[in-house]
Structure formats: structure tokens, C-alpha cells
């Protein structure tokens, strides 16, 4: 399992760097919108007693940790894919980063756009299920469409890309958000830009670091 | 002579390391993005990250 350790080392470094980049972008772009939206929320009694990180370094520190760890997890997927296909270098990495952005951000966001706190949505479990289904179908669909040689796999891949959106994401009977609509639109645009940068950087870094390792 | 061209089939020696990396990666991502603990500790710590990564949060 020497190869596994190398994949972990590459992914850890790429993930932490990518997560750091994302955290800096978020700190200046989306965090102000989240904080503004929270002003419209009335604290519910049941939530008051729950521990939550204090605003400032504690809250930002947990976001940095979250971004670094998810970056590590996503980088593992990229590194393993490139390892299996004998690819290395930042150009291949950029391709896999773009695929990750489509699978884990764009496709789920088409049905369930990034939301500010205080937005009423359908029941959490059903949205999580749709999100997971969409990411899985998009991943397999892209694989079939782009990487498969057989015609039937390409057609099946295209079908899988469309399927989650034909089924449709779960939405509440009556949509209701506390924060103004313009704030929400702003949030969708900025998270899309930030996550695009994150994924492309993560892919390029993973690919570049992979070429430093001998398998 | 060893060929360097990318082959469509994955050599058997490469299956386990790659699969382990994928399982570990998915466990990390899905755990951080989707777990709801009864005390809301994990949810509150991961809150801003989840919102900004378009994970369903509340």
C-alpha cells in the first residue's frame, strides 16, 4: 500500500492548499452575505442552547478546517482517478477539477441552488438524497459520455446526466426566504465563482503534485 | 518493453490503493457535508462551509 500513502500525501497537500484558497475567497465574498442573512433570522429557543463557534477566529477557523478536510477528500478522488488512468501533470488535473466542479457543485446547484441561512426548503433528508443521487448520476454520466468508447455507454451517460433534472429537486410547497432576493442571487453567483476557482486549483495542484511522485 | 500509454484496463495492483483512496475521500466528504448530530455540534462547526459548498444544510 505504498501507493496509497503517496496518494494520501499528494491529496493532503493539494486539499489543504485548495481549502486555504477557498477560505480566503469565502471570507471576503460569501461570509459577509451569510452574516447579513443571519440578521433576518430570529433565534429559536431550541437553538440557543446548542454550542456554536463564536464569530471571529473560532468560526473562521472551523470553516478553514472544513474546507481543508473536504479539499483533502475531493483531492483523493481526483488523485485516485488520475492514478488509475496513468495520468499526471496540471493539465490533466485541470480536467478532473472541472469534472469535480460539475459533479459536486454545478449539477446539484441546478436543482438546489446554494442557500443563505433562513431560507425555507423542502425536508432536509429528501434534499440530501437528491443531492447525492445527482452527484452520483452526473459522475457516472460524465464518465460514460467522455471516457467510454462504446456507443451505448455514451448514450447511457447522456441519459444519466439528464435524469436527476427530469425527476426534479424537492422543493417546499411555498417558497419563503427571510433574506432579500438580491442577497440570495448575489450569494449564488459568488459561491459559483469561488467553487470554480477552488476546483480548478485543486485539480491543477493534485496533478502537479502527482508528477512529483513515482508509482 | 514497458508501455507508458494509458490503458483502459486498470492493472490489478492498482485497484486496491486507488479504491482505498476513493473510499477514504468519499467518507470524509460525505461525513463533513451530510452528517447531522443530535447536539448540532458538527452542523454548527461546518455551517458556513456547507452553505458555501452548496450542501443542503438546514
Image: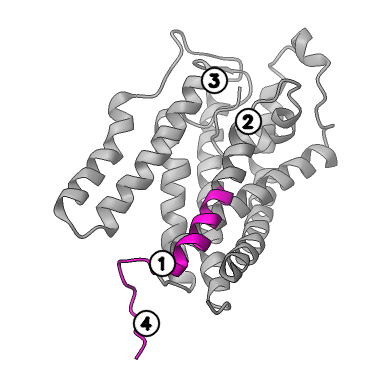
Q: Which chain hosts label 3?
A: A
Q: Are marks 1 and 4 in contact (CB under 8 Å)?
A: no
Same chain under badges 3 and 4? The reply is: no
Does residue A26 appear left or right of residue A100 in this picture? Answer: right
Q: Which residues are magenta?
A: B1-25
Residue position for label 3: A124
Same chain under badges 1 and 2? The reply is: yes
Secondary element at tag 4: loop
Q: Which chain hosts label 1?
A: B
Q: Nearer the viewer, mark 3 or mark 2?
A: 2
How dense is the environment of label 3, judged by Cα within 10 Å: few (below 14), some, or many (20 and up)? some
In the image, residue B15 lies in the stretch drawn in magenta: yes
Q: Nearer the viewer, mark 1 or mark 4?
A: 1
Residue position for label 1: B12
The residues bearing labels 3 and 2 have C-alpha atoms spaced at a distance of: 11 Å
Residue A162 image label: none
Point 32% across, 30% down: residue: A165
Q: Which chain hosts label 4?
A: B
Residue position for label 2: B35
Residue position for label 4: B4
Of A96 and B35, the residue lying toward us? B35
Classify A109 as above or below A215: above
Q: Which chain hosts label 2?
A: B
Percent position of residue A179, x then y: 61, 20
Same chain under badges 2 and 4? The reply is: yes
Q: Are marks 3 and 4 in contact (CB under 8 Å)?
A: no
| Label 1 or label 4, whichever comes before in sequence order | 4
Point 76% across, 28% down: residue: B41
Secondary element at tag 3: helix
Q: Nearer the viewer, mark 1 or mark 2?
A: 1
The residues bearing labels 3 and 4 have C-alpha atoms spaced at a distance of: 47 Å
Quadrant hosting residue A149: bottom left
Amino acid at each position: 500500500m505504498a501507493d496509497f500513502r503517496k496518494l494520501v500525501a499528494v491529496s493532503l497537500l493539494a486539499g489543504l492548499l485548495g481549502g486555504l484558497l477557498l477560505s480566503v475567497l469565502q471570507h471576503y465574498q460569501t461570509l459577509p452575505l451569510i452574516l447579513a442573512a443571519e440578521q433576518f433570522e430570529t433565534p429559536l429557543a431550541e437553538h440557543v442552547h446548542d454550542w456554536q463557534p463564536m464569530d471571529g477566529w473560532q468560526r473562521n477557523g472551523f470553516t478553514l478546517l472544513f474546507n481543508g478536510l473536504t479539499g483533502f477528500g475531493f483531492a483523493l478522488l481526483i488523485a485516485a482517478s488520475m492514478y488509475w488512468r496513468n495520468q499526471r501533470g496540471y493539465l490533466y488535473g485541470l480536467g478532473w477539477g472541472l469534472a469535480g466542479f460539475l459533479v459536486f457543485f454545478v449539477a446539484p446547484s441546478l436543482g438546489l441552488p446554494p442557500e443563505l441561512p433562513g431560507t425555507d426548503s423542502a425536508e432536509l433528508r429528501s434534499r440530501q438524497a437528491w443531492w447525492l443521487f445527482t452527484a452520483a448520476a452526473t459522475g457516472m454520466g460524465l464518465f460514460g459520455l467522455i471516457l467510454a468508447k462504446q456507443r451505448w455507454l455514451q448514450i447511457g451517460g447522456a441519459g444519466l446526466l439528464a435524469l436527476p433534472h427530469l425527476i426534479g429537486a424537492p422543493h417546499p410547497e411555498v417558497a419563503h426566504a427571510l433574506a432579500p432576493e438580491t442577497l440570495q442571487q448575489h450569494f449564488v453567483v459568488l459561491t459559483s465563482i469561488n467553487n470554480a476557482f477552488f476546483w480548478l486549483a485543486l485539480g491543477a495542484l493534485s496533478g502537479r503534485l502527482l508528477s512529483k511522485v513515482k508509482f | 518493453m514497458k508501455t507508458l500509454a494509458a490503458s483502459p484496463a486498470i492493472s490489478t495492483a492498482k485497484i486496491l490503493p486507488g479504491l482505498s483512496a476513493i473510499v477514504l475521500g468519499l467518507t470524509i466528504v460525505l461525513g463533513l457535508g451530510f452528517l447531522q448530530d443530535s447536539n448540532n455540534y458538527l452542523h454548527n462547526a461546518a455551517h458556513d462551509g456547507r452553505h458555501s459548498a452548496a450542501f443542503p444544510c438546514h
